[in-house]
């Protein structure tokens, strides 16, 4: 090794050495200054309208290490020297490893930026933060595993057997914990797709309540009766979920029945009465009112309107007012509401009983 260094020094003149060192030092200083300038310019450009892409560029460029600048400068300066085969290969290997390490730092900065931005969007979501931490750990582990394998491959290490062993081990582990992994990936799907969030009122099959917690394995819902319902994340995504928190307006359909003795002119007037009862309220939008059908117990009228608020209590208050207004109007017009009735026909003239045609026994004297 010492002999190789002596040969290297002897094979290059002093002026060449000075040139190589000057180029290396100058390039290192230039790259350092360029990094500072680019980061400042990017920060200034992102200040008025801070977009995620500009902020991401700043975060990634800020993680460019001085070691990377040193290796690039060293490699550039070494091109002015007459190097042997061994020295050239060693320098190339060091530069590749440095570049791979810098790629890992850039990737790690991008992952950290994405996690931070996502955590700000879901502020206060403890379950989402736990799932996000697990996802970030998995991404970093995958990133540095790839960097390590590529680095070993560039050093001449046969990584085929190592990759095959890791693949078999990964399959075995995945089969052993497939249920846990299923819930974990479901949690990540919930976190990314956002079908619901903490505080949303949801209905899942026959269960309903307010979402309290979204974890990496389970989601917990507080029902209307007070108990906590715990769903597995994988089972939850397989179900049909109704998210009432995202309802913008509520469509209401109700029916009113009058007796069959209602005169036709008053039957024609009933839809207008229903419309008037709805439109007299604020915060609603009338849709339609019709004489729908001849029912079993009376004439059926159907009315549809929209409540311009998702609040259930507001809907019930409006429906109460509408029902009272309809009742008063029908009583004023002397229109009777239909009651569930059933008519039973009874035959008052029953059929005569059949004569007894059996022979009578003779009396014995």
Image (spheres, helix red, strand yellow):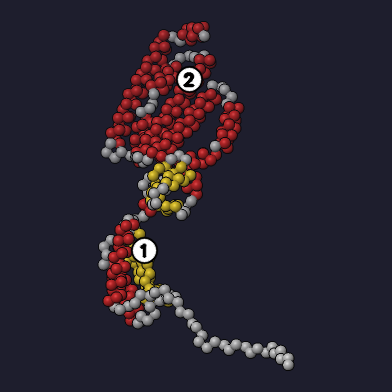
Say left or right for 95 vs 173.
Answer: left
In the rendered image, which residue does mark 2 sit on? 94
Q: Position of residue 215 (x, y in %)?
A: 43, 40
Identified at 39% across, 44% down, the residue is: 212
Identified at 46% across, 42% down, the residue is: 218
- N-terminal label among 1 and 2: 2
Q: Nearer the viewer, residue 301 or 325?
A: 325
In the picture, residue 315 is in which quadrant? bottom left
Q: Residues within 10 Å of mark 2 (few under 14, many from 20)?
A: some
- Give above or below for 41 relative to 198: above
Identified at 34% across, 23% down, the residue is: 32
Q: Position of residue 154 (x, y in %)?
A: 53, 24
Q: Nearer the viewer, residue 309 or 45?
A: 309
Question: Which of the two discs, 1 and 2, sits closer to the camera?
Answer: 1
The kind of secondary structure element at disc 2 is helix
In the rendered image, which residue does mark 1 sit on? 252
The kind of secondary structure element at disc 1 is strand
In the picture, residue 78 is in which quadrant? top left
Q: Position of residue 89 (x, y in %)?
A: 52, 18
Q: Position of residue 286 (x, y in %)?
A: 32, 66
Identified at 51% across, 29% down, the residue is: 146
Mark 1 to mark 2 CA distance (whole Å): 72 Å
Q: Nearer the viewer, residue 311 or 275?
A: 311
């Amino acid at each position: 090794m010492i002999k190789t260094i002596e040969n290297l020094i002897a094979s290059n003149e002093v002026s060449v050495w000075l040139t190589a060192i000057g180029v290396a030092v100058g390039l290192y200083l230039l790259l350092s200054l360029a990094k500072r300038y680019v980061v400042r310019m990017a920060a200034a450009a992102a200040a008025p309208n801070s977009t995620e892409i500009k902020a991401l560029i700043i975060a990634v460029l800020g993680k460019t290490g001085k070691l990377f600048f040193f290796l690039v400068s060293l490699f550039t300066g070494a091109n002015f020297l007459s190097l042997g085969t061994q020295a050239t290969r060693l320098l190339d290997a060091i530069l590749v490893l440095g570049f791979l390490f810098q790629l890992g730092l850039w990737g790690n900065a991008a992952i950290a930026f994405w996690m931070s931005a996502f955590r700000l969007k879901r502020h206060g979501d403890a379950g989402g933060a736990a799932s996000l931490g697990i996802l970030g750990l998995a991404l970093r582990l995958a990133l540095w595993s790839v960097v390590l394998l590529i680095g070993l491959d560039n050093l001449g290490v046969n990584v085929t057997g190592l990759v095959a062993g890791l693949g078999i081990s990964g399959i075995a582990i995945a089969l052993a914990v497939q249920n846990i992994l299923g819930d974990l990936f479901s949690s990540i799907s919930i976190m990314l797709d956002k079908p619901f969030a903490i505080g949303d009122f949801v209905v899942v099959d026959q269960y309903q309540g307010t979402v309290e917690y979204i974890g990496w394995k389970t989601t917990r819902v507080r029902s209307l009766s007070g108990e906590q319902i715990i769903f597995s994340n994988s089972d939850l995504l397989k179900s049909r979920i109704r998210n009432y928190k995202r309802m913008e307006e509520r469509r209401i359909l109700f029916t009113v029945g009058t007796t069959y003795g209602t005169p036709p002119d008053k039957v024609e007037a009933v839809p207008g009465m229903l419309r008037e009862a709805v439109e007299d309220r604020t915060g609603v939008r009338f849709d339609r009112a019709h004489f729908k059908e001849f029912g079993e117990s009376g004439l059926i009228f159907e009315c549809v309107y929209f409540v311009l608020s998702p609040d259930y209590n507001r809907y019930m208050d409006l429906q109460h007012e509408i029902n009272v207004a309809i009742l008063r109007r029908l009583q004023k017009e002397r229109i009777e509401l239909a009651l569930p009735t059933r008519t039973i026909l009874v035959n008052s003239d029953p059929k005569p009983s059949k004569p007894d045609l059996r022979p009578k026994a003779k009396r014995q004297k």
